[in-house]
Image (spheres, grey):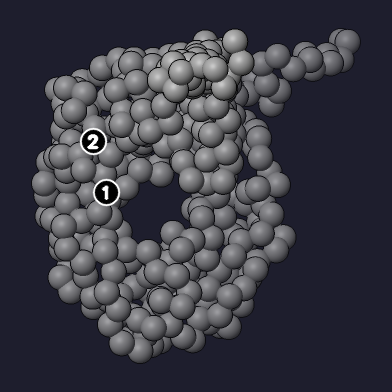
């Protein structure tokens, strides 16, 4: 029937029906594409993820992950749609998403003193940061991490001043001279002091006027905890007279106890490090006196070293500075102390060591 013969109301119904078919087709097509995008899950490997102990941890607790304040994850596998994977990859590459996750022992119910096992995948899934990507955490390497919780005690600690090479600086004044800080129970020696480290420019400023710094306690190498209050430090202006020198052709002396002399031989494992160069800060007179010392560095050999059975030992060198200049603070080390590596072996009566070829015996 020609369209012009169709009644108007029927024609309108046909047009509505056709429009509904078109809309239904479009909607179905969109649903198919969305379903296909969701169904085609992909995996995305993140290799620079890190878990760090949160800064908000109770200051009376020392929490470590595998013995460190942070642990790197070799690989984290995420899964999701291709669209979300592409978005996550772009955000990470552009630096808009940093894959660093913060561990709060209280949130994870791991505040009891001792060791706990953290399931890494479960932890990552529970973080808000992982959900920001809209992806699912599938696996992680390592899969578990040992969480260590140690209780700390608040103590009054003396403040000591050092330069950025960890050499001690004699301060004219430190106010206050002691600060409160948390340290592990049973700490002794350097662990019972709060440190302030000054760079070269800060040293120059402190010789003119007091500078304010925050002391810290070193719980372990690379792991520090700040004290409760800052201190003001001034340095004596006399230190400006000290100049930087390098001592070359370093002469070493062994200092064995009387019980070991002539009975044991010392083998130095790292002679280049021990007898390379020594960086000092000194007055010209003190530098000349140190140059003329018979031995620049001394390695002490203890009685207990004879029980090492040839195993490698380590000990800090003693820098044989002229005492008259040490007393006047006119000479000091300008580098980290070198640690000697050595072995101690007994001598036979003929001077040879066990394991060496037997000495030749002349025929009678």
| Residue at the right extreme, as displayed | 363
Residue 26, position as x, y percentages in the image: 52, 20
Q: Nearer the viewer, residue 208 or 30?
A: 30
Q: Give the left or right position of residue 125, taking residue 85 as reference.
A: left
Q: Secondary structure at mark 2?
A: strand
Q: Nearer the viewer, residue 343 or 231?
A: 231
Vertical side of 54 occupied by 192: above or below: below
Q: Quadrant of the N terminus?
A: top right
Vertical side of 274 occupied by 75: above or below: above
Residue found 21% across the figure and 70% down from its top: 231
Residue found 43% across the figure and 66% down from its top: 163
> Can residue 84 be seen in the rendering of this structure?
yes
Neighbourhood count class around disc 2 (C-alpha, 10 Å): few under 14, some 14–19, many 20 upward: many
**Which residue is tagged 1?**
225
For the image, the number of numbered tags is 2
Residue 42, position as x, y percentages in the image: 57, 16
Q: Give the left or right position of residue 214, taking residue 5 as reference.
A: left
| Residue at the front extreme, as displayed | 5
Residue 17, position as x, y percentages in the image: 46, 15
The answer to whether mark 1 and mark 2 are in CB contact below 8 A is yes
> Can residue 140 be seen in the rendering of this structure?
no
Residue found 66% across the figure and 40% down from its top: 270
Q: Which mark is residue 62?
A: 2
Q: Nearer the viewer, residue 55 or 187?
A: 55
Q: Which mark is residue 299?
A: none
Residue found 59% across the figure and 50% down from its top: 253
Vertical side of 6 occupied by 196: above or below: below
| Mark 1 / mark 2, whichever is N-terminal | 2
Neighbourhood count class around disc 1 (C-alpha, 10 Å): few under 14, some 14–19, many 20 upward: some
């Amino acid at each position: 029937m020609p369209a012009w013969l169709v009644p108007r109301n029927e024609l309108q119904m046909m047009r509505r029906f056709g429009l509904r078919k078109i809309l239904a087709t479009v909607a179905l097509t969109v649903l198919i594409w969305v379903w296909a995008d969701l169904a085609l899950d992909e995996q995305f490997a993140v290799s620079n993820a890190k878990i760090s102990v949160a800064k908000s941890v109770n200051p009376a607790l020392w929490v470590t992950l595998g013995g460190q304040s942070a642990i790197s994850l070799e690989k984290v596998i995420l899964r999701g749609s291709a669209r979300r994977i592409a978005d996550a990859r772009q955000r990470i590459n552009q630096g808009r998403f940093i894959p660093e996750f913060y561990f709060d022992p209280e949130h994870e119910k791991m505040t009891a003193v001792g060791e706990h096992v953290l399931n890494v995948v479960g932890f990552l899934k529970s973080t808000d940061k992982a959900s920001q990507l809209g992806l699912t955490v599938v696996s992680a390497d390592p899969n578990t991490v040992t969480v260590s919780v140690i209780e700390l005690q608040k103590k009054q600690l003396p403040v000591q001043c050092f330069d950025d090479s960890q050499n001690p600086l004699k301060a004219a004044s430190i106010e206050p001279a002691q600060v409160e800080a948390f340290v592990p129970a049973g700490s002794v020696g350097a662990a019972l002091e709060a440190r302030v480290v000054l760079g070269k420019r800060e040293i120059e400023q402190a010789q003119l006027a007091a500078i304010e710094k925050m002391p810290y306690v070193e719980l372990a190498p690379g792991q520090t905890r700040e004290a409760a209050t800052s201190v003001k430090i001034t340095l004596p202006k006399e230190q400006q007279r000290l100049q930087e020198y390098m001592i070359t052709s370093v002469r070493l002396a062994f200092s064995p106890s009387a019980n070991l002399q002539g009975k044991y031989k010392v083998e130095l494992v790292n002679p280049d490090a021990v007898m390379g160069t020594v960086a000092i800060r000194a007055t010209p007179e003190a530098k000349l006196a140190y140059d003329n010392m018979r031995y620049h560095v001394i390695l002490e050999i203890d009685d207990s070293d004879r029980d090492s059975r040839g195993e490698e030992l380590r000990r800090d060198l003693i820098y044989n500075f002229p005492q008259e200049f040490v007393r006047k603070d006119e000479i000091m080390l300008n580098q980290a102390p070198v640690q000697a590596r050595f072995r101690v072996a007994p001598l036979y009566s003929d001077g040879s060591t066990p394991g060496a070829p037997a000495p030749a015996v002349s025929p009678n």
